[in-house]
Amino acid sequence: MDERETRSRVRKDYGSIALNVLQGSPASCCGSSSCCTSTPISTGLYGQEAAAVLPQELLTQSLGCGNPLALEQLQPGEIVLDLGCGGGLDTLLAAHRVGPSGRAYGLDMTLEMLRLAQRNRDRVGLAQVYFLAGELEALPLASNTIDCVISNCVFNLSPNKSKALAEAYRVLKPGGRLAISDILRLRPIPERLRQNPQLWSACLAGAMAVDELQELLAHLGFIDRQVQIIRTYQTAELDAIFQAAGLSEQDVAEFDGEFFASAFIRAVKPA
Ligand SMILES: C[S@@+](CC[C@H](N)C(=O)[O-])C[C@H]1O[C@@H](n2cnc3c(N)ncnc32)[C@H](O)[C@@H]1O
């Protein structure tokens, strides 16, 4: 798949997930089927703070792989950007933390997801939230304007991760923070499986290696870089995703042992 094909496949798959939720079905990382709702990646990510701010029904819409706000201090009045906001859960949580004097932007390239996010915002009733249509690789925001960039399980989906991270760096203010959750790979993925579109949309095939991510962050000029693995997955735990992607037994055997992990990634743009 080239960059254009990857982006349009991801947009189509997440568009149908959003439409399902808008029509009352559960969120799932496998498009129109609900095969992945029981996988461990997107379940149990949020604690009491989130439950106090968002209705339980919204929390079950998470398609994330962590909680980027769990370790990040946001201050009242700050400006936050949530990249690949999906249904906007992290955007809304960030908006709650920065308060009415702050601002939270949620950006997504999938228009159906933005409709869902807007519906969720209206339901929660927070005013300081703005949803924007756009791509990670060409952010529609001015340079040096954001205090904190957050993102939950999205960079792995980007077909051009260096451009996406460069854009995050560009929009951050000097001293601004990057705080993202993402899936990383612990070993190389065979090329034919890296090209599997369903496995890409399910946040696995496009996962970066820890070293690759560290090098990219350093190359772009980020300082205080931390990549913390918070959970590794056994092959069996991801079986529903592998089945949905049409992987043969032989393909699944390539992912034997601990292959994928959720990580918390933090870095700072120098002041
Ligand atoms: C796995 S979902 C995560 C959604 C949300 N962050 C959450 O935690 O529930 C990925 C989201 O990123 C969006 N996305 C993927 N690649 C993108 C890109 N290159 N630019 C903008 N949005 C993108 C998709 O449309 C989808 O809504």
Image (cartoon, rainbow, N blue to C red):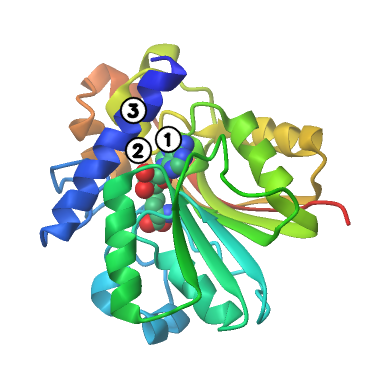
First along the sequence among labels 2 and 1: 2
Q: What is the distance, in whole Å, between disc 3 and disc 2 at their CAs?
A: 28 Å
Numbered disc 2: secondary structure: helix
- Residue matched to label 1: 257
Within 10 Å of disc 3 (Cα), the crowding (few <14, some 14-19, many 20+) is: few
Rendered view: 255 above or below 78: above
Numbered disc 3: secondary structure: helix
What residue is drawn where x is 67% and y is 73%? 78
State the image coordinates of residue 75 (x, y, percent, origin top left): 68, 78
Q: What is the distance, in whole Å, between disc 2 and disc 1 at their CAs?
A: 6 Å
Mark 1 vs mark 3, foreground winner is 3
Q: Residue reaching furthest bottom?
A: 52
Left or right, 20 with respect to 90, comes to left
Left or right, 79 with respect to 87, comes to right
State the image coordinates of residue 28 (x, y, percent, origin top left): 23, 50
Instruction: Give the total of numbered labels.
Output: 3
